[in-house]
Image (tube, rainbow, N blue to C red):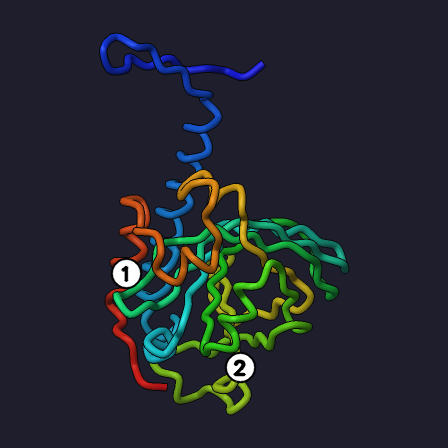
Amino acid sequence: MKTLLTLGGLAGILITVPLTAYDNLADHEKRFRESATVLSEIMQASDKGIPQDLIEKASCVAVVPNLKRIGFVVGAKYGKGVLTCRTTSGWSALSTIRIEGGSVGFQIGAGETDLILLVMNDRGKEKLLQDKFTVGGDASVMAGPVGRSANAATDAQMHAEMLAYSRARGLFAGVSLEGATLRPDTDDNHDVYGPEARQSEIVNGKFKPTASSEPLLVELRKFPPRDK
């Protein structure tokens, strides 16, 4: 049985709405705000943050706050985050994405990791907007360089379609996402923008950003586009 909330409507008409709808929207708004906090804190990390010139060159930025990770030799990852891309009128509305998958390596324990993904060119954006893609299989994703500028980046990093970063327990670094899958969270996007919304339309400017997405967009507007 669903929990219902009854609101007073126009002309005394009562409007009954499932509470789950409000719960979902509250979760989305919280994720939008947390994504802004993650990006802001990482960019304030001076010589240990993401090079500013890389964000200025990025076509899209994805932020996944509190990515769940658990592992003993074979690790697993799961999380939800947001994606925004540059349009002719600025950064787009936020689309919700999911990251899932495993990695093989010597990792022990469980915890949460903040993840940032920079999509560096149109090829990377095209693959990210697919219904589902596998990191390392469908797109080249490398651990991104850190510092005030990208001068120390290798040639391979500068030509990667995507660059990935993580922050766990206060430590920030480039990260490998080999084998993980990323896809749009269609249900969440429908909650926010309506039943017809598609991720490609959201990040290409068809939908207006919500009020709760503004903190992240404000952070990103600090880095105007730079020629690649």
**Callout 1 secondary element:** helix
Question: Viewed as shown, does residue 99 lie left or right of 32?
Answer: right
User: Few, some or many C-alpha atoms within 10 Å of disc 2 (few <14, some 14-19, many ≥20)?
Assistant: many
Tell me if residue 130 comes above or below residue 21 in the rendering.
Answer: below
User: Few, some or many C-alpha atoms within 10 Å of disc 1 (few <14, some 14-19, many ≥20)?
Assistant: some
Quadrant where the N terminus sits is top right
Tell me if residue 140 comes above or below residue 105 in the rendering.
Answer: below
Foreground of the two, 188 or 224: 188
Q: Position of residue 105 (x, y in %)?
A: 73, 66
Q: Earlier in the sequence, mark 1 or mark 2?
A: 2
Q: Amino acid at mark 1?
A: Glu
Q: Which residue is mark 2?
A: 160
Q: Position of residue 92 (x, y in %)?
A: 34, 60
Residue at x 41%, y 28% (from the top left corner): 22
Residue at x 33%, y 66% (from the top left corner): 43
Tell me if residue 23 comes above or below residue 178 in the rendering.
Answer: above
Foreground of the two, 10 or 119: 10
Foreground of the two, 102 or 168: 102
Q: Position of residue 66 (x, y in %)?
A: 50, 49
| Residue farthest bottom in this picture | 155
What is the number of the mark on residue 115?
none
Quadrant where the C terminus sits is bottom left
Question: Viewed as shown, does residue 174 lie left or right of 224?
Answer: right
**Callout 2 secondary element:** loop
What is the number of the mark on residue 219?
1
Residue at x 48%, y 86% (from the top left corner): 158
